[in-house]
Image (tube, grey):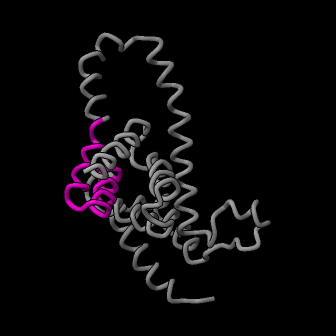
């Protein structure tokens, strides 16, 4: 029972300190799940993020449910999901009550202005995470730690990224088709070894 309550606390803590949605949560998830508690390794975390993205629903809730289930079964999944939802529910209820009073508050506006750069930084960290798991063959920190000896670029991931980016900018294709096409292209390209 203690572990189930701890899962609630862990995901409630992530929910409290995350602004900006699912992608802003990824660095916090990685820090808590991989670095601090070692619930999973880096490759498993990358698979978790991919699974949370393709599963219907918010990324944070999907990830919390998966980790909760992995750690403590159905009760763990329920506890982690509820922990992830609780801070948002409280904030929404408070906003509904107090928003009309504080809508023009200078302090509120300044607080929101201060939060924006943090959200941008967290989303930037998520971009780096995705690049490290798909385009680069080693974490970016190896450039500094080991003088880039083990650092390389996964040409298949780079080709898929460039092609999807080009198609999205040029023709504004629906993301479902982009994901499907990228998945098929990955299956084909990952078989080619250079």
Residue ranking furthest to the right: 147
Is residue 36 shown above or below 42?
Answer: above
**Relative to the observer, which residue lies in front, 112 or 170?**
112
Is residue 175 shown above or below 187?
Answer: above
Q: Where is residue 76 drawn, in percent x and y? A: 25, 55
Quarter of the image for residue 100 reads: top left
Q: Residue at x 51, y 52 (%)?
A: 31
Q: Residue at x 57, y 62 (%)?
A: 131
Is residue 23 shown above or below 102?
Answer: below
Q: Is residue 74 magenta?
A: yes
Q: Where is residue 83 drawn, in percent x and y? A: 29, 43
For this view, does 176 lie left or right of residue 77? Answer: right
Q: Is residue 159 visible?
A: yes
For this view, does 122 lie left or right of residue 50? Answer: right
Residue ranking furthest to the front: 2
Q: Residue at x 62, y 73 (%)?
A: 137
Q: Is residue 174 visible?
A: no
Q: Residue at x 35, y 65 (%)?
A: 51
Image quarter in which the C terminus is found: bottom right
**Bounds of the magenta span?**
59-86
For this view, does 77 lie left or right of residue 146? Answer: left
User: Chief secondary structure of the magenta span?
Assistant: helix
Q: Where is residue 60 drawn, in percent x and y? A: 35, 50
Q: Is residue 114 magenta?
A: no
**Relative to the observer, which residue lies in front, 82 or 101?**
82
Say how many tags the image has: 0
Is residue 123 shown above or below 89?
Answer: below
**Relative to the observer, which residue lies in front, 8 or 153?**
8
Quarter of the image for residue 88 reads: top left
Q: Where is residue 149 drawn, in percent x and y? A: 76, 73
């Amino acid at each position: 029972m203690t572990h189930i309550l701890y899962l609630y606390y862990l995901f409630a803590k992530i929910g409290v300190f995350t602004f900006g949605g699912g992608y802003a949560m990824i660095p916090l998830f990685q820090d808590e799940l991989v670095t601090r508690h070692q619930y999973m390794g880096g490759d498993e975390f990358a698979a978790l993020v991919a699974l949370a993205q393709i599963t219907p629903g918010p990324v944070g809730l999907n990830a919390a449910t998966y980790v909760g289930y992995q750690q403590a079964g159905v009760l763990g999944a329920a506890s982690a999901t509820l922990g992830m939802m609780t801070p948002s529910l409280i904030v929404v209820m408070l906003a509904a009550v107090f928003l009309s009073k504080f809508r023009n508050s200078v302090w509120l506006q300044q607080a929101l202005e201060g939060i924006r750069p943090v959200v941008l930084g967290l989303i930037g960290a998520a971009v780096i995470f995705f690049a490290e798991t798909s385009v680069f063959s080693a974490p970016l920190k190896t450039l500094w730690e080991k003088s880039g000896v083990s650092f390389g670029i996964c040409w298949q991931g780079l080709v898929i990224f460039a092609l999807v980016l080009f198609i999205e900018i040029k023709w504004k294709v629906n993301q479902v088709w982009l994901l499907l096409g990228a998945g098929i292209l990955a299956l084909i390209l990952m078989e080619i070894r250079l």
